[in-house]
Amino acid sequence: MRAGIPAGGDAYVLHPTAPSVEEYVRLRAVSGLSPRTPEQAGPAVANSWAFCHVRDAAGQAVAMGRILGDGGWYFHVADIATDPAHQRRGLGRRVMTWLLAQVDERAPADPYVTLMADEPGRPLYRSLGFVETAPHSLGMVLRR
């Protein structure tokens, strides 16, 4: 599927842009990601290195993903989310494929691409070439 154009009879269209703040907040919530406020979502939507989302035939945002990065060597995949009513249709793979193509096309050689893999997404990420780093690396968080 090309960005902005459905493939054949496909009812889904990938857009190479961020969804609206409201759609971002909704997709995070319905897909099981931790909830975020519009105040938190605004900068995420505005300041990502790459962002795409998928709309269904009715025009509703039903999947999304983004990359945070410095544009040099470090890129982090985040917010891979699909509305449960639209899961198991390859939308997560489409989002990931588009995002990784952006790294291939726009980043300098030898980028370092990371993500935090929740259990449901691990088979997809593995199929795209991601490997576990533990015990060499361990994801950590600072809660405030």
Image (cartoon, grey):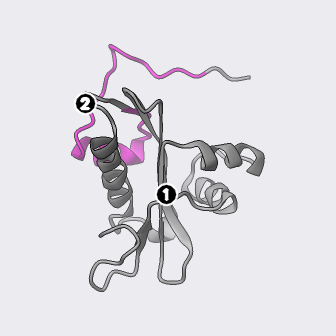
Cβ atoms at labels 1 and 2 below 8 Å apart:
no
Where's residue 140, x and y in %?
52, 20
The answer to whether residue 81 of the structure is visible from this angle is: no
Tell me the chief SS of the magenta region: loop
Q: Is 130 contained in the magenta span?
A: yes
Q: Which residues are magenta?
A: 114-141
Q: Which residue is mark 2?
A: 109
Choose the circle earlier in sequence order: 1 or 2. 1
**On the rendered structure, is 58 left or right of 36?**
left
The answer to whether residue 39 of the structure is visible from this angle is: yes
Q: Which residue is mark 1?
A: 64
Outermost residue, top direction?
Answer: 136
Q: Nearer the viewer's eye, disc 1 or disc 2?
A: 2
Please tell me which residue is depicted at 31% across the width and 29% down the height of the picture.
Answer: 111
Measured along the vertical axis of the image, is residue 44 above or below residue 56? above
Residue 117 is drawn in which quadrant? top left
